[in-house]
Image (cartoon, grey):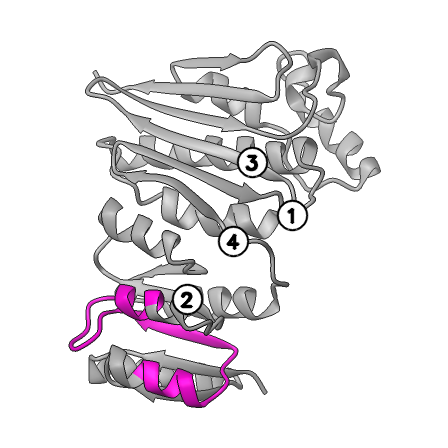
Amino acid sequence: MKRILVVEDDRANRYLLTHTLKSAGYDVSTAGDGLLGLRRLRKETFDLVLLDIWMPRLNGLELLAKMREEGLNTKAVVMTSDDTSETMLHAVRQQAWQYLAKPVQLRELLHVVENALSSVPVPPIEVLSAIPDWVELLLPCERNTAQRIQGFVARLDTGLPEDIRDNIGLVFHEMLMNAIEWGGKLDPNRKVRISFIRTRRSLMYRIADPGQGFRFDELAHAAVSYPVGLGAQSASVRQEKGLRAGGFGILMARSLVDELLYNEVHNEVLFLKYLD
């Protein structure tokens, strides 16, 4: 039975999380603040820790830092209603596995917990720049990493209406998955470099993969290679190749962003959305 430590200072939330996880078959222990959580992590072995960020005595970010300093490598999922860019990026830098927004949705909680517990260890995400207007990360070329980082990047302050922000998130996810699958060959020892840059008038996303690039006439698996209205035919090609459903990243980007640019060999893509 998997063991989970819930570190949460709010008694009602602690009870709800504990009850939900125990009902799902997990062995659950609790701690009422970060310092008590650290003491338990030093003495006992857990498979996962669910960690509130703002707590007395030792907050969640400080606890994450202590865990890394002391070699306590338990996967950590952070929970908070504070979705500022600074908090999100600090959590990533301290190797938080995933993020849950408060109030926690119980179905999402169980999905994230199951995913974290079933995922094999991979190299950590590296934070190269963590200022709100210039975020730069190195990600292992592994599908689960893309899912994890999406939860953080989606909450960066963009200044866009929610529907447009969601659309840009879809484009970012699909283009990142292309980079991981095709450029990185799903090798977690290879890295994709992603950047998010905000200026007064635009948002810029850059994704650079470690591959040798591609040619558009070689993309039989992608919808962009088909005439308008026939892009769905790419699904059969993808199925034959054993690929995930998708292949619409470039088409989506062209329709949802204001500018889309590739470098000469097509292993770096840049897309912009104007704020004006």
Q: Residue at x 61, y 62 (%)?
A: 121
Q: Amino acid at mark 3?
A: Val
Q: Which residues are magenta?
A: 37-65
Residue at the limit of the structure toward the front, as seen here = 69
Q: Amino acid at mark 2?
A: Arg
* Label 3: few (<14), some (14–19) or many (≥20) C-alpha neighbours in 10 Å: many
Per the rendering, the mark at residue 68 is: 2
Q: As displayed, is residue 22 above or below residue 249?
A: below
Q: Position of residue 107 (x, y in %)?
A: 43, 67
Lateral position of residue 149 relative to residue 243, left or right:
left
What whole-number distance in Å separates the C-alpha atoms at marks 3 and 1? Answer: 10 Å
Q: Nearer the viewer, mark 2 or mark 4?
A: 2
Q: Any magenta on residue 48?
A: yes
Contact (CB < 8 A) between labels 2 and 4?
A: no
Q: Amino acid at mark 4?
A: Pro
Q: Residue at x 69, y 13 (%)?
A: 216
Please identify the quarter of the rendering in which residue 209 is found: top right
Q: Secondary structure at mark 4?
A: loop
Q: Position of residue 269 (x, y in %)?
A: 52, 20
Which quarter shows the C terminus?
top left
Is residue 15 shown to the viewer in this render? Answer: no
Contact (CB < 8 A) between labels 2 and 3?
A: no
Lateral position of residue 8 relative to residue 47, left or right:
left
Looking at the image, is mark 4 or mark 3 earlier in the sequence?
4
State the residue position of label 4. Answer: 124
Q: Secondary structure at mark 1?
A: loop
State the residue position of label 3. Answer: 192
Q: Nearer the viewer, mark 2 or mark 1?
A: 2
